[in-house]
Each structure stands twice: as structure tokens, then as C-alpha cells.
Amino acid sequence: MTSAKITPFPTPTQDPTDSGGMVQSLGLFSSTAIVAGSMIGSGIFLVDADIARGTDSPALYLIAWIVTGVMTMIGALSYGELAAMMPKAGGQYVYLRESLGPLWGFLYGWTLFLVIQTGTIAAVCVAFGKFLGVFFPSVSTTHWLWHIAHVPAIRIGPMVLGNMEIGVNTANLAGIAVVIVLAVVNIFGVSLGALIQNIFTSAKALSLAALVLVTCTMGRNATAWNANFGPGLDAFWHNAGWRTLHPVQVGIGGPIVLVHLFVIIAVVQVGSLFSSDAWNNITFTAGEVKNPRRNIPLSLILGVGFVLTIYFFVSLGYLLVLPMQGDPNGITALARGLQHASEDRVATAALEVVFHSAGAYLMAAAILVSTFGCANGMSLAGARVYYAMSKDGLFFKSVGKLHPRYKTPVAGLLVQAAWATLLCVSGSYSQLLDYIIFAVLVFYILTIAGLFVLRVKQPDTPRPYKALGYPLLPGLYIAMATWICIVLLRYKPQYTWPGLVLVLLGIPVYLFWSRRSASRLQSVS
């Protein structure tokens, strides 16, 4: 029996714009806020230090962000066609199901629930708790309320498992509180969740704009300018030659090898590409967007375009305030430089140079706003995927039900919050996110490949918006993303096969759910 016969999927005669009982209340601004708000978390404040260490060149450092911008915008433009073609709750899950088959859709939804969405929610909520500690020192990862156990590190091939503290400390307790509050808030209608998203996205957009303004004007200093751009831009192009070789450590504790420009740019995409991730979350909420055939593609373009532009100028601003290289033992933020910012908190280091001790408080406040808004957007959107999976008989039946009054997937929100809470307590979310980065990129490749498949399988299906530059730009995305995957397989195996293992674990789960669904249908008939 084929999987298509096992699982009860919608027939082609169904209205692709059917909201399934959900209330279509998200306008263009709210949709764009979900795109931008889900993308902007804590990454842009932290990952630049690792990118700077990897490239060791101001020019390559900015080129890494340009590559991220090109890929992410092509992805958004490609998803716009799929969203306008199939504006249903579930988004990317639906696109994979319809183009490549139900197994691929399920594997994406499985991975999303297991790690991608819940792991990110856990990570940004605990980050919220950590930065809350700047204002309230008692909130800390070392202030344990209930320490259950320490799990020692165990190395299996390129993967290191364990090295985690399990229990409840004041930092992850604050994170858990945010997880629960946002789950409850989003039960009371998508409009309330969208209102919170609009407020917090606007606030963090203004804070990032202020960061750009400060670093590019009053924050500029001669030390950083001479180190990164002078004389005659020689410093800017340092280590950026075609024949320049860059050191990369293979795996964890492996040998250090020398690689060329295209390889090092691919390696550092681990930071930049995935600090720009979650732009696809708006597609999950398609069943609640007004005029989705127009507003979802447009919100993808506007939201992604804004975030990528502001990210580039924030990173440029860092170069104007902090020298690329510095002394890892330096006392001041200026002396430590971009590569050796304390705990990789580049944004905090930049503001410390400008505002001295007050800079840490300003940046902590901005990150609190940023992480709260990011967690809200991801909480709101993620539950819609599990709702769509349940409707297909591939998840708990209760998750496919809407609140009778608010028309929100209550069970999906609560199940998502419960798993994210468990990840907070286990301390495993950060490690799991490292493992899944490769798999996330693979799912993007498969989804955009599905764009080509659907052009052949469903040539007559209405496409109110068609992917700009098709087939060249989608093909370029697949080529660039595939190259990054190949490089990560070779040089960063700790980010690759562990993620694939997590994905493949979903196959027996899919067989269980599909057989259970088939049995249910047979009993009904």
C-alpha cells in the first residue's frame, strides 16, 4: 500500500484558500511583522564574532552577509509563489506534501516540532532570562532552584552528546515563564498575538535602526577605521584574495586544514544564514491571513528585505566601532575587538565603546525586546503546522481542533509549549539546534525543488504570483545551498549527520501515524 493511500490528504477539488474554520484577521502589516519579528532574535547581536574569526577579513565578513542576503531573498521570492498557490495553514509542510509527497511533509513537521521551532523558542526564551539578569543579578544560569543532574560529555564520532546541566535555574525559569505566557496569550485569538507581535517587532526594528545610527555616526572611531579600512582600503581587503587560504578545524578536536575563499564563506554561513532564519513562519499562518494570495508573498518580500538590509548595516556598523582583530586578553571592548568580544556579545561591546558602562544596559534592554518578540512570532506560527499535520492524520487528533470561540489551535500551542519547556529544563536546546542546522537547509532545498516539481505536476493551478527570475534564481538558490551542505559535510560533520539522524528518526514515526490513520478510516467506513 502506498503512502498516498494511507493518509487522508485534501483532494484537488478542495478550495486552496479554505481557512479550515480559522479567522482570517492578519493584514499586511501584521504578516510582515511576523516575518521580521520571527527572524530577529538574538543572533545578530552575537554571531558576528564567530564570522569575524572565521573570515579574518573585513571584506569577507561583509561578503558573508551579502551571500546570506542573496540566498534568503531568493528563498522568500520562491516561497511567495508556493504561498500564493496554496495559502493554507501549515505552509512549508503543505508545500512539501503536495510536491514531493506526504513522507517529506511529515519529516519536515516532525523536525520542526522536535527541534527547529521548539528548540528555537527554548533558546530565545532562555536568552531572555540571561539578559534579564543584567538588570536583576539573581536571574542567572548558575542560580539553581532545583539541580537534577549533570550529564557528562560523551563523544560519538564527530558528535559530542551531554555536557548539560539538567534542572531549573532562575534564568531558564524566566524562559519557561515566557514560553507559558506566550502560549496562553496566543490561545485568545490570533489578533491578540498579532498585536503583541506588531508592538515588539516595531520596537526592535527601531532599536536596530538606532544601533545602526549610533555605530555609523557618533560611534565611529579612528582605531576601528584604520584597522578595518585603511590605508587605502588595504586593511579592508586583508585575507580576501582569491589565492588566500583560511584555517578551518574539521569537526570537534579534528585537524586544522587550509581552505579557499568559497569554502570559508560557506563555513561561516552557519552563523549568518541561520540568524536570518524563520522568515518562512508566515506561511504557517496562511489560514489566518487576509487576502493571502497577495499579502503572504508581499509580506515575505517586505519583511525579509527589511531585516536583511538592517542586518548588513548593523554588521557594517560593528566594523566602524570595533577593530576586526584584537587582544583576547584585552581589558576594554575596543582592545578585544570584533573577533574577541566578551562571550561573543558584539553589540554589547560596540555600545560599551560608545556609552561605556551604560552600553550593556541599553543592549540588554534591546535584546529583551528582541527575544520576546521572536518567541511570540514562533509560538504563534509553529502550532499551525501541527494543526495541519493533525488534519492529515499525522499528529495527535486533539491538535487538529480549534478553540470554539477564538478559533486557535489550543492543543497545538500547549503541546509546543510543553516540549519547549522540557528542552529548557534539559539544557539540550542549544546542542540540538547545532545538530539541525544542516537539516533545515536541506528542507529549504527540497521545498524550492518542489517549486519545479509543481510547475510540471500542476501546470494549470492558478499562480497569482510567480517566483521572480524562475527558473534561474530558484536554481541558483539550490546550487548555493547544496554547496554549503557539501562543505558542512566535509568540514563541519558535527552540524550534519547528527541532524540527519534526527530527521530519519521520523520515518518510523510516520509509518506509525499513517497506519493509525488508515485504521481509523477503515473503522469509520
Image (cartoon, rainbow, N blue to C red):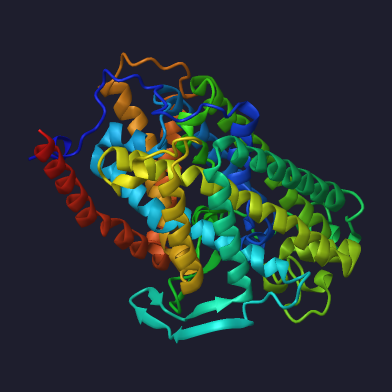
Q: Which of the pair 349/381 is nearer the observer?
A: 381
Q: Position of residue 108 (x, y in %)?
A: 35, 47
Q: Position of residue 45 (x, y in %)?
A: 69, 58
Q: Residue 278: tell me if it is visible.
A: no
Residue 415 higher or lower than 1, as above or below: below
Q: Which of the pair 42/375 is nearer the observer?
A: 375
416 to the left or right of 523: right
Quadrant of the rendering where the N terminus is positioned: top left
Quarter assignment of residue 392: top left
The residue under the point 64% across, 82% down is 143
168 to the left or right of 7: right
Residue 52 higher or lower than 143, as above or below: above
Q: Position of residue 496 (x, y in %)?
A: 38, 61
Q: Residue 6: tell me if it is visible.
A: yes
Furthest residue to the front?
405
Quarter assignment of residue 517: top left
The residue under the point 51% across, 68% down is 424
225 to the left or right of 492: right
The residue under the point 39% across, 66% down is 493
